[in-house]
Amino acid sequence: MNILLNILDELIILFFVFSILGWITEVTLKYIQFHRFINRGFLIGPYCPIYGAGVVTVTVIVGGLVGRHGTIFETFFAGMVICGALEYFTSWYMEKFFHARWWDYSQKPMNLHGRIWMGNLILFGLASVIIVWWFDPAFFKVIEGIKSEYIKYMAVIIVIIVISDNVVSHFMMNIVKKEIDNRKGDSTEEITKEIRVLLKDKQMLIRRINDAYPNLQARPKRLKDEIKNIKKEYKKEIDELKRIKAEYEKEIDELKKQFK
């Protein structure tokens, strides 16, 4: 039991390390793109948990912690699938609960619903190979040289920090969601522009959300419900047309039989 708890503590630290590295990567890429600092990610602190969660999951599944150590190909494939699934789920979750599309790969080749795309999946696979085959062994060798008490304290502090940040960030995002749902525009583009102007005048933590997601697309519940209703009506009309077509074809067949 103690061994499992020690491994869990080490994985929490691994999660935090790569959450920070993921944040640094995101910030660097956006600095290159926009030439200014942008605090990326859902959380306030300098970390992106999706990266840490991906690394920990890949490490556990093919890193030899549970069962055998995967081959390079297995590690690459696992990284693509696991990290891709995490990114897809995170995109879906944030759109479902906060009524906006926070990033969109619809213009990228080989994308799935605009939530993930092949370019990122390949990078996830390559990064997983590097991490599992080279970084993880060095990481666990270093951390095993630290007293288990210190590791536990570090893990507890990390959990407290991340949970606290999640609570505050969810509160802030719910404020943004309410603003999105209160807009009266007739299109997502119009509402998105209104939201961007509105968020710039809010307090710092909410302005940060606007900066963190420059490709934000508002998806208010009212418009989503309207689209669903339109799709339902469209489906009803299609079904009715199919029924009429079937009756027409049946009548044609009967007429053909009469004239034979």
Image (cartoon, grey):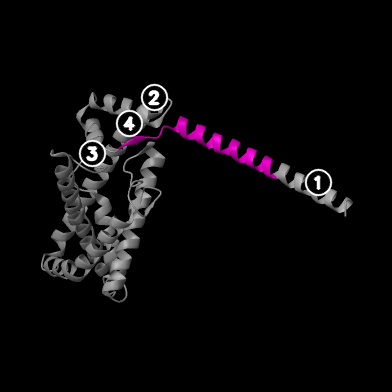
User: Could you tell which of marks 1 and 2 lies nearer the N-terminus?
Assistant: 2
Q: Counting other residues with Cα less than 10 Å from the Cα at mark 1, is it few (<14), some (14-19), or many (20 or more)?
A: few
Q: Vertically, is 118 above or below 191?
A: below
Q: How far separated are the C-alphas under marks 4 and 3?
A: 13 Å
Q: Position of residue 190 (x, y in %)?
A: 36, 27
Disc 3 marks which amino acid? Answer: Ala
Q: How far separated are the C-alphas under marks 1 and 4?
A: 57 Å
Give the side of residue 95 with respect to residue 134, left or right.
Answer: right
Q: Position of residue 120 (x, y in %)?
A: 28, 55
Q: How far separated are the C-alphas under marks 2 and 4?
A: 11 Å
Q: Nearer the viewer, mark 4 or mark 3?
A: 3
Within the image, what quadrant is residue 86 found in? bottom left
Most foreground residue, 18 or 163? 18
Residue at image location 14% in from the left, 44% down from the top: 32
Q: How far separated are the C-alphas under marks 3 and 2?
A: 21 Å
Q: Counting other residues with Cα less than 10 Å from the Cα at mark 4, is it few (<14), some (14-19), or many (20 or more)?
A: many
Q: Secondary structure at mark 3?
A: helix
Residue identified by numbered label 2: 183
Q: How far separated are the C-alphas under marks 1 and 2?
A: 52 Å
Q: Which residues are magenta?
A: 216-242
Residue identified by numbered label 4: 176
The disc at residue 212 is 3
Within the image, what quadrant is residue 209 found in? top left
Q: How far separated are the C-alphas under marks 3 and 1?
A: 62 Å
Q: Secondary structure at mark 4?
A: helix
Disc 4 marks which amino acid? Answer: Val
Most foreground residue, 113 or 167? 113
